[in-house]
Amino acid sequence: MQIRSRKVNVHVVLNYSAMGLLVVYIFIHALLGIIDQLTRATTHLKKLPQIGCNGREEFCNRKYSNITHIATHNAPFVGVLPMDNNNVDIPTQLDAGIRFLQAQTHRNTFGKLSLCHTNCLMKDAGLVTDYLKVIKEWLDKNPQEVVTILLTNGDRLDIAEFDKAFNKSGIIPYTYIARGDPNKWTLDSWPTLGQLMANNTRLIAFLDTGAEQTKVPYIHNEFSYFWETPFEPLNDPSFSSCAIDRPVGLAKFPERARQRMYIVNHFLDTKIGGIQVPNRRDAARPNSWGGTSGIGTHAQRCIGMHGHAPGAVLVNYFDKGEVFKAQDRLNGF
């Protein structure tokens, strides 16, 4: 009995030691994040000037489908904790020139539609309604800008829940509706940014799962209009793949795929105690233009395979690296 008790005590000590090391590691990671943010606080992100459409006169006559956006991955998850993907809040992201925001949604413990990272216990960044209000307020103040939002429906909730959030936020008057059969929609079907601006339909909304455009026409099914490259932020740091990963089965129909925009997943993760989290420390490397893991290298590979530039390149910590240089280059500037 005494031997067994000692064995149990040894296991308890080891388990607590492992937990303690994990807590220390997370603390150090958070501390490094705080230092990083304090350092970056001295580097002011420039506000994109209100010129033409989305900061460029040339975009006014260019179709929405013919513009490459740098997109913030998990845009509302801001802070210094390991699960945070961004250093600055939504208005600052938009002021700096981000025009494509991606976010995860889940139902929180109170049954409300929230912005949650994987689940609402890990990270809850607030209600989707409040997120949309922030974007609406920014659009109110910036009449020459077109913004895209992509929401993921992690709990496969009914579209009515998203419709309710949009209604409560007051943002619906800004939403664009892609009218017509999505299966017949092509790259040429999209309006120009100038047309979107003239009609004041300056918000384009997509949902990855559960969209029903016959019921809620302004929330578009992402995979009727986009496809995505593989999501392998840990296993492929050179970003070698431009394959059509989602929606499943589209790769068998390359001609159909060429008539859709696509999203390049371009961000790195690391592991803390066996848990996969965003790689804040090395974010500048994938956010550079060149190099083996740069945005330009990855995007040019995809252009060579698919015949046109991506509609969005999804990144973490956009304020590190050269993301706007990459955006300009991919748009021909």
Image (spheres, grey):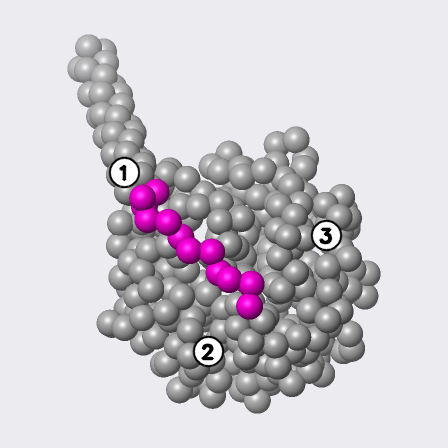
**51, above or below 174, in the image:** below
Q: Tell me residue 167's x, y (percent).
A: 77, 48
Q: Who's the residue at 62% across and 46% down the image?
A: 134
**Residue type pointed to by label 3:** Ile
Looking at the rendered structure, the number of numbered marks drawn on it comes to 3
Residue stretch rendered in magenta on the structure: 40-51
Between the residue at mark 1 and the residue at mark 3, the CA separation in whole angstroms equals 36 Å
Residue type for callout 2 = Asn
Q: Position of residue 122 (x, y in %)?
A: 47, 37
Q: In the rendering, which numbered label is found on residue 171?
A: 3
SS for callout 2 = loop
Q: Disc 2 marks which residue? A: 331
Residue 245 shows in this picture: no
Give the spatial CA distance, label 1 vs label 2: 34 Å
The N terminus appears in which quarter of the rendering? top left
Point out the image quarter for the C terminus. bottom left
Mark sitting on residue 35: 1
Left or right: where 23 falls relative to 304: left
- Mark 1 or mark 2: whose residue is earlier in sequence: 1
Which residue is rendered at x = 73% and y = 65% of the image? 200
**Circle 2 crowding by C-alpha within 10 Å: few under 14, some 14–19, many from 20:** some
Residue 325 visible in the picture: yes
Judge left or right: residue 203 versus residue 272.
right
Specify whether 92 is left or right of 164.
left
Tag 1: residue type? Ile
* Residue density around tag 1, few if under 14, some if 14–19, many if 20 or more, within 10 Å: few
Distance from disc 3 to disc 2, alpha carbons, whole Å, reads 28 Å
Check if residue 163 falls in the magenta segment. no
